[in-house]
Amino acid sequence: MINNIPPAAILIIGACLIPFLKGRVKATYMLLLPVIGFFVVASVPEGIHWTVGFLDYELIFGRVDPLSRFFGYMFTIISFIGTLYALHLKNEDRQHVAAFLAAGSAIGAVFAGDLLSLFVFLEILMIASTYLIWARRTQASYTAGLRYLLVHLFGGLCLLTGIVIHVHQVGSIEFGVIGLNGLGSYFILLGFGVNCAFPILHAWLPDAYPESTITGTVFLGVFTTKVAVYCLARSFPGTEILIWVGATMTVLPIFYAAIENDLRKVLSYSIMNQVGFMVVGIGIGTTLALNGAVAHAFNNVIFKALLFMSVGAVMYQTGKSKCTDLGGLYRTMPLTTVFCIIGAASISGFPLFSGFISKSMILGASTQEGMGVLWLVLVFATAGVLHHAGIKIPYHAFFAHDSGIRTQEPPLNMLLAMGIAAFLCVFIGIFPSALYSILPYPVDFQPYTAAHVLDTFQLLSFAGFAFCLLILAGLHPVEWRVILLDADWFYRKGGKLFVRLANRFVGTDRTDRTDQKPESEGG
Amino acid sequence: MGFYIFLAALILADFFVPKHPFFSWEGYPSFYAAYGFVGYVTIVFVSSYILRKLLRRKEDYYDD
């Protein structure tokens, strides 16, 4: 019976009931929704389901194949973990509903078989995500949310323009392989590119995500960018330009993350870096590369959520998230420290942790194709990941100088959510076949060869050795209380200039007011 | 101390583990160790001593 309902509908319609429930019933219900969603994703047979006629077209809400099912697993699992992490919020129904709308629309986009329903789900995802940013209810989150909304409206319009041109050209709304051929496809790629945080289009990510709520960021960090990865894998596999776009994405943010003071901004730049690895895999386009890209998406969703959760736990307990304010918390938050280190080891790609078994596939694919320069760039970026995510995050939060802060572990639900994510990171790292068996294409890849394990340990350990030497020599720079200019400068300063000029030449209001107060809690 | 012994063991192990280099540079002994070390130092120096000088602004830069 339940199989007659699309998983997206279970989460989206199910979310509407949340405000009417209370106490344990509500908690159980919220945890149950993603579980039901997971079983539907697992049990629906491959093929086309849930079709609806619309004008002259047929909308497909359930194109089930190994690729869409894989992302379906990923999104339902992380929805469960994210919901568990947010369970202590008692009077935040709107935030819970927004989180479920985001999860449901992401799953809807993944199972969409046509471009029109894909577009609609992406727009719902955009609105739900904007609300998750506004839910922090600060002036900073209000303005960051507005910028997020404007940038994504631009991306959405590009996508819509592309879809209209493309459908006009090919006469079908099917959401399949498009490839770069003609104006429509360029607009579609641009639309996906905004969501995917392509370089220069990326500034919304480190601008908006750190302004969201502690629990909201866990959802935000997962859905928008990974849905975009899915869209690229579906429509542009083997598109060569993606290799170099992705390679730039892996390198550019590591320099920013290295000097950023706010740990949640560091993690936001890290999202861009990790998505870069996936985009490279999609650009290479061989079955090994595509498998690597989506496997890395899966692992990244778990370990990035784990890192956001552990930094979020620190923020929940101390109210702080900047390197300059934190340090020495391992004394009072030992469990959170361990979870954070597991997330850090996973993202760095240490053997026996999940990042190792998926990033190796992308590197292996670049080797197979004989792309030496690309390989050098990706291995360099791996050292960069160790720097900002592997060392900087746990070091500045839990070790480094003692900030004098004495606190305690976060609530049990937060610990449990981090524990489940940490378990998955280790489990997948030790038993990669568990993940390989559900990948979209047959897998013939062995990550644990003696040479590969040794090479990885050499790379990471000597990068860590460099860190130790720099610290001992007093050459490792301390963090500064500054912000860094990024591509958002153009529209943040440009927007103000525009308003000033408009006021001067055509406006009657000459007061130069560009900021407005948030309307009733930004709702 | 244990860490330094571990590092030395990694370098020594290079001579005993059979390798299958695809690219010529992968075959050099300790290539990965050197690349990791140099890469890390490069990231720290370029970002801290060049990029931060160019891009830093006060925390209230956008708040006017």
Image (cartoon, rainbow, N blue to C red):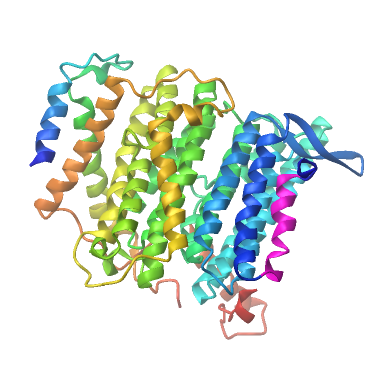
Image quarter for residue A27? bottom right
In the orientation shown, which residue stands out farthest toward the front? Answer: A24
Q: Nearer the viewer, residue A109 or A490?
A: A109
Image quarter for residue A317? bottom left
First to last magenta residue range: A6-21
* Residue B59 locus on image (x, y percent): 36, 71
Q: Nearer the viewer, residue A122 or B47?
A: A122
Q: Nearer the viewer, residue A209 or A483?
A: A209
Q: Main secondary structure of the magenta part?
A: helix
Q: Is residue A517 visible to us here?
A: yes
In the orientation shown, which residue stands out farthest toward the right? Answer: A56
* Residue A523 locus on image (x, y percent): 65, 73
Please tell me which residue is depicted at 67% across the width and 77% down the height of the picture.
A506
Q: Quadrant of the N terminus of chain A?
A: top right
Please tell me which residue is depicted at 25% across the width and 60% down the height of the picture.
A330
In this view, A416 is above or below A517: above
Q: Is residue A363 magenta?
A: no
Please tell me which residue is depicted at 53% across the width and 71% down the height of the picture.
A136
Q: Is residue B12 left or right of residue A134?
A: left
* Residue A96 locus on image (x, y percent): 61, 64
In this view, A371 is above or below A343: above
* Residue A340 locus on image (x, y percent): 34, 52
Q: Is residue A109 left or right of residue A23?
A: right
Q: Is residue A9 magenta?
A: yes
